[in-house]
Image: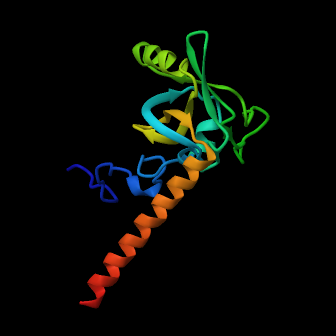
Amino acid sequence: MPRQPAHQVTPNKEKNPRRDPTASGERDAAVNRAAAHHYFLQDRFEAGIVLSGTEVKSIRAGRANLKDAYALIKDGELWLLNAHIGPYDYGNIFNHEPLRTRKLLVHKDELRKLVGKTQQRGYTLIPTRMYFKNGRAKVEVALAKGKQLWDKRETERRRAADREAREAIARSRKGR
């Protein structure tokens, strides 16, 4: 007669994807909020990013900052500059450099489009967000044209007018 197992064996359960919303792709690891204020964002491209060692763990921990970052095309390759990824807390002597230049991975035809568009006067490449997709770190790069001061004021005026209109509609609905 075969021996009965001492405990109940259950099949491997799926890991709860809600445990880490950044790693599962539900929440962005880093967002460049200042980009929409300082630039007119036009075309957006998804690019992979070449990371080393402890950078992925730092990004998952929310230690990435894209505030002053920009992308540059050099020697037929796309590079991310000034993106700050803080050192990993539990790293060792092989921890990464926080502000190092990182390579972005895009298809050749996308790169050709970007080269043509960035050579126009006033256009640049700005990373708008960093996130995980299928376990891989991705960066969304936007083709951007710089705003003048009066453009920023106009955007702020329009935003305030929209907010006031929404509040007025909500008040009128409550008053019924």
Q: Is residue 96 left or right of residue 14?
A: right
Expressed as whole percent of the image width and height from the top left, the position of residue 46 reads: 44, 31
Expressed as whole percent of the image width and height from the top left, the position of residue 96 reads: 72, 33
Image quadrant in which you'd find residue 8:
bottom left
Residue 45 visible: yes
* Outermost residue toward the top in this view: 75
Q: Nearer the viewer, residue 38 or 142?
A: 38
The quarter of the image holding the C terminus is bottom left
Image quadrant in which you'd find residue 42:
top left
104 is higher (above) or lower (below) than 18: above
27 is higher (above) or lower (below) than 48: below
Q: Is residue 151 left or right of residue 82?
A: left
Counting the numbered discs, the total is 0
Q: Nearer the viewer, residue 64 or 165?
A: 165
Expressed as whole percent of the image width and height from the top left, the position of residue 35 reads: 57, 44
Q: Residue shown at 27%/83% (left/top)? A: 173
Residue 33 visible: no
Q: Nearer the viewer, residue 49 or 72?
A: 72
